[in-house]
Image (cartoon, rainbow, N blue to C red):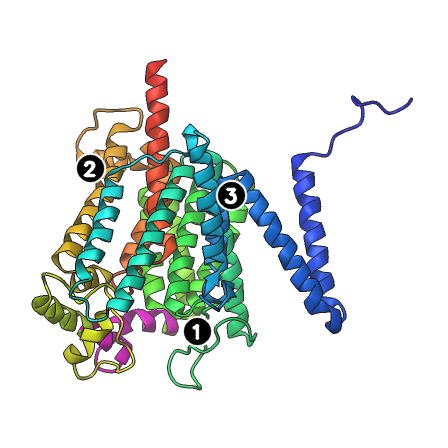
Amino acid sequence: MSATKSDTPALGGFDIRLVTALLLAAVIVGLLLGDPGTRSGALLATLALAGVGVVALLLWKAEWSVPLMLVAASFDLGGRIISEPMPLTAYQAVLLIGLASWALRLLGGDESAKPRFTLIDAGLLLLLGAALWSLPFSLDKGDTVMAIARLVFIYLFYQLTSTFLRKQWVVDVSTAAFVGAGVLQALIALAQVRGASIGNTAVRVGGPTSPLRGSAFFDDPNYLAAMLAAAVVVAAIKVVHARSLRQAIPWLVAAGVSALGVYVTYSRTGLLALAVGLVVVWALAPSGRKRWVFLAGVLAVAGIVAANPEAVIGRFTALTDVDSDQSAATRYYMITSTLEIIRDHWAMGTGLGAFDMAYPAYRIAGSSFSVIRPHQLPLAMWAEMGIAGLVAEITLTFAVLRMAWTSIRIQGPSVTPHGIVDLLAEAGDRLTLGQKAGLAIIVSYAVGSLFQYFLYIEYLWFGVALLAGSTIARRAQSSEVQDV
């Protein structure tokens, strides 16, 4: 019998993706194993073709800019496309194309692409206002202007991502892309400590003979560690909410690989952010799984400590060892120095991005001469932008807490909780997975920001956008249900 349309199976979506992935893998293998004389030209042509494909994809569906930006941002300086006349990274290129595609959607009257403003937007706009406030009396006006430009694009990134993260499929793809990017960078970091000459291999724990700190393509291993810590907690949330072991295993493997990546960065910031982030995972777990999550966490910590107790415990105890650890001493002494800067520049600040111009005069003996950039974001915002920076910081913090608290209070089976303690205990049953992932990322980076300057880190604002977008979508869904 001749084949007809009904008895000839169509090629499914998964099969198409699989074939595409295999084809791309074949091309990459061919380029790597091919003739060295033709490899560079073929690679350039492949990259050009991939670039055209990305542009076409983003113009067709701007939502894809969100996961693509998360992957591109993980390459940091390694994602630089051009250096002259001005540097342009792959992340920045995707952001610009995504913004253009989004603008076309808005001009076309697409209601789903219209942004929804919240109190978080007010906080971000106040932050931009605080940056402008600090400009007239800035100690380095050029750096302050550049810092203001970076903040503008951070806000555009937040608006773009929070708008499209109102769609569940974008949440699913973006969280998977974020975790996947973390796994990739963790594998690169693991390869670096094994001797691979790829990415940034210039940072060590101590002197030239001390162990190498995995950095992947990040300039600072602490930045990689913070990203991987956030990737671990997102993957852990996926594991906790998996409906079967088959669904949980890929996320469990991803969490394990990313956790190993955090370990080889030798970052105390990353370890602390990871530890607090996992507490958030337990707190936001469904009530029926909390005890199992707690048990799994205890076993995981015990296993990590048992694997190398001297290294793990040593890195944590060094947090307070200001006598023999100059890195820890610098951070603690910088707190005092920053408070002195705030005392003298409390109104207008030093100027956003100009902290390093003021700090040397306030540096305390015993701290590192090479570290002049701020390391405590909550204090640095006041020091750099004056009282306006403090107001913006308080507003942003309040906006995030209010959104999370309101979501816990009004969502769920019971709108009349039996007290605050019971309400918090029910948080895992009331919040959506997107809201939980957003909160976990925010908390993880908030802890890290006590020791690092994460103001311009896109993943922090991705967490805020994920919380905002998921919350707006949940409220819209609830309104539709009530209307029906």
User: In this rendering, does residue 67 appear at all?
Assistant: yes
User: Vertical placement of 223 versus 13: above or below?
Assistant: below
What's under tag 1, amino acid-wise?
Arg
Q: Residue at x 55, y 70 (%)?
A: 191
Q: Which residues are magenta?
A: 311-332
Q: Residue at x 37, y 13 (%)?
A: 484
Q: Is residue 322 magenta?
A: yes
Q: Nearer the viewer, residue 376 or 431?
A: 376
Mark 1 — residue? 213
Secondary structure of the residue carrying numbered label 3: helix
Secondary structure of the residue carrying numbered label 2: helix
Q: Nearer the viewer, residue 92 or 284?
A: 92
User: Vertical placement of 148 versus 221: above or below?
Assistant: above
Q: CA distance from mark 2 to mark 3?
A: 40 Å
* Residue 64 badge: 3
User: Where is the N terminus found, in terms of image quarters?
Assistant: top right
Mark 2 — residue? 421
Q: Earlier in the sequence, mark 2 or mark 1?
A: 1
What's under tag 3, amino acid-wise?
Trp
